[in-house]
Amino acid sequence: MAGRLFDKIWDRHLVASPADEPPLLYIDLHLVHEVTSPQAFEGLELAGRKVRRPDLTVATMDHDVPTIGLDRPIADPLAAEQIARLRRNAEVHGITLYPLGNIEQGIVHVIGPQLGLTQPGMTIVCGDSHTSTHGAFGTLAFGIGTSEVEHVLATQTLRQVKPAAMAVTVDGELGPELTAKDLVLGIIRALGTGGGVGSVIEYRGAAVRALSMEGRLTVCNMSIEGGARAGMVAPDDTTFAFLEGRRHSPRGKLWEQALDDWRSLVTDEGAEFDREIRVDASALRPAVTWGTNPAQSVTIDDVVPDPGSMSTPELRQGAERALAYMNLTPGTAIRDITVDTVFIGSCTNGRLADLRAAAEVIRGRRVSPRVRALVVPGSARVKAEAEAEGLDQAFTDAGFEWRSAGCSMCLGMNGDILAPGERSASTSNRNFEGRQGPGGRTHLVSPAVAAATAVAGHFALPGDL
Amino acid sequence: MPGVQRITGRAVALDRRDVDTDQIIPASWLKRVERTGFAAGLFGAWRTDPGFVLNRPGASEARVLVAGANFGCGSSREHAVWALQDFGFQAVAAPGFGDIFRNNSVAAGLVPAQVSEQAAARLFAALAADPDAEVVVDIAARTVAIPSSGLSEPFELADYARWRLLEGLDDIALTLRHEQEIGAFEAGRRAWLPGLRDDAMSSPA
């Protein structure tokens, strides 16, 4: 029978399928960070249990780490306590930890691929909803809550009701001004913020195949913003080229064996999905969100939509509420909206390719005097590699702040936040109310649009400058 | 975690769709290392509005939250569930939940009662007419009822989740019954899969 990529990965991780219980799925890699793990370790210890597979567990600090002044003690006592707990828990349970100051420290979803820990056919979980990122390698990767973190620590398995399989097929070719971010925002617009609930998405089609690994990571990262549990792209030569020679990639004979296996991780011809949507890449334009969920976006050439034009009362109400929060008037041209802050970074767009794309736009230009702009690399290694190319200089010359690695203003836990009422152009993944700081107003964009917007002071394409 | 058969009490009606977990518990609250102490942070930003439903008299005695579709979307933070529980909620009735929120709820003992859109509309209408009405969530029968309005609406809850909630079972203990199978599975894992035991940087700086 023709199989789907998702089924192939699912089936090879089934430990047990007891009657009347959800199946037990083996977890190949468990990523741990400081914010969603302390209660799990505590629960584990209170029950007298051990971490079953410390060797399949890796920890780093990302959510509330400072991105400036790393030479000084962490000023926020609560963040310092969480970070101290993670150190202690890693030490007690024998878990590899990449702490602040280590070259491998960074956002969990940036370091997994960077280390070669994320490989095709694996199951990967983390107490973070953007774990879907790793699906770019043809991996089943999804976010879990703290109780499930404890369950994985104790058993290296999870009980999961099998999600439905959805195909998102992107036909055609992305135009020259388009990035993976614009593509995924376009997909979420089509899907709606809850359209993927209960599903794992496989991204398919010519435009997906043409994406770099960085682009695929961006697309899979935002699967959760359409409600999906996970997103995946079948591995191919782009995937294998990315993986070859990385620290945890197989070598020698094992590499050959792995390649043979990975090549079988595709959806077979004729396999059917529970649901399929198609998106025409050639009809897309660079995207900017106007509302308070990631499905509420338009193209940069558009105007702020009129809630009265929405098709259902629910959409209308949601739009009215969002526009009130965002302080926007229907009919305003997106390019006429000015911003106070530009944030380039996050697990969505904090990789080297993203920083390069932004740097290309700002080289020889200056950030608008009314804009505060910051770049936060996704990992310490991304930062070092960017510096080796002189990107830090290009950014600081243009008036950007060049920070150290972490989640930073994507969720504003570490003090990098918007002031109430401030408006940002952000390469992150969520424009929820208050996401980047209480009262802050977030517009999601690609790194290229973020960079051009920093220079123009209002939403702009690189070509507008 | 104690088992729960039936939840009886007042309800709070939050007639909004796509309520994300950043709204349920803002990120600044995620720095706690405990599972408790989140009640004051529940809907922290929205509660600054005196007219917000949680600020109504009697809301602090509520046991059931009735909400719009796709409740608990977004971030995986289980703190959202803990905050609802700390405030006093034992069940949320909504026409759909974020997947991770639903799992977190069952794990922590909060009942995610998925009702139809029509049932949610009827519950909202009944609560608008009588905000102090008693609401009964029966986990065994899978119904949410407002007896004074004669309403009884079925809800969806998977059998296994229902059983765990009724019995208050520890999921890890249930899984450890399969320890032999886990061991057998591990013996057959593919040779190239990554592990960190021999990682040169396994000792923290």
Image: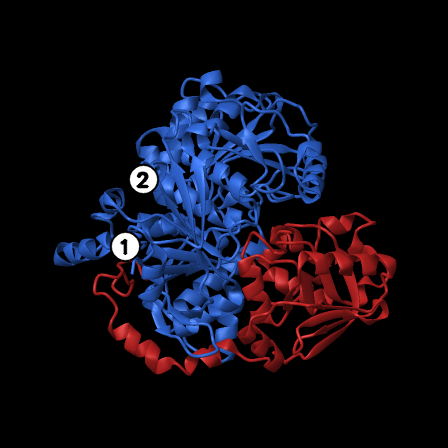
**SS under mark 2:** helix
Residue A110 shows which numbered tag? none
Residue B55 locus on image (x, y percent): 81, 56
The chain holding disc 2 is: A
Residue A275 locus on image (x, y percent): 46, 51
Chain A shown in which color?
A: blue
Given the image, on which type of amino acid does mark 1 rest?
Answer: Leu
Mark 2 and mark 1 residues within 8 Å of each other at the beta carbon? no
The chain holding disc 1 is: A
Given the image, on which type of amino acid does mark 2 rest?
Answer: Arg
Decide which of B111, A198 is in the foreground and name it: A198
- The answer to whether residue A349 is above or below residue B6 is above
Q: Earlier in the sequence, mark 2 or mark 1?
A: 2
Q: Which chain is red?
A: B
Q: Residues within 10 Å of mark 1 (few under 14, many from 20)?
A: many
Residue A405 in view here: no
**SS under mark 1:** loop
Q: In the rendered image, which residue does mark 1 sit on? A: A265
Q: Residue at 55%, 24% (x, y): give it.
A: A459
Real-space CA distance between mark 2 and mark 1, rounded to the nearest whole angstrom: 14 Å
Q: In the rendered image, which residue does mark 2 sit on? A: A209
Badge count: 2
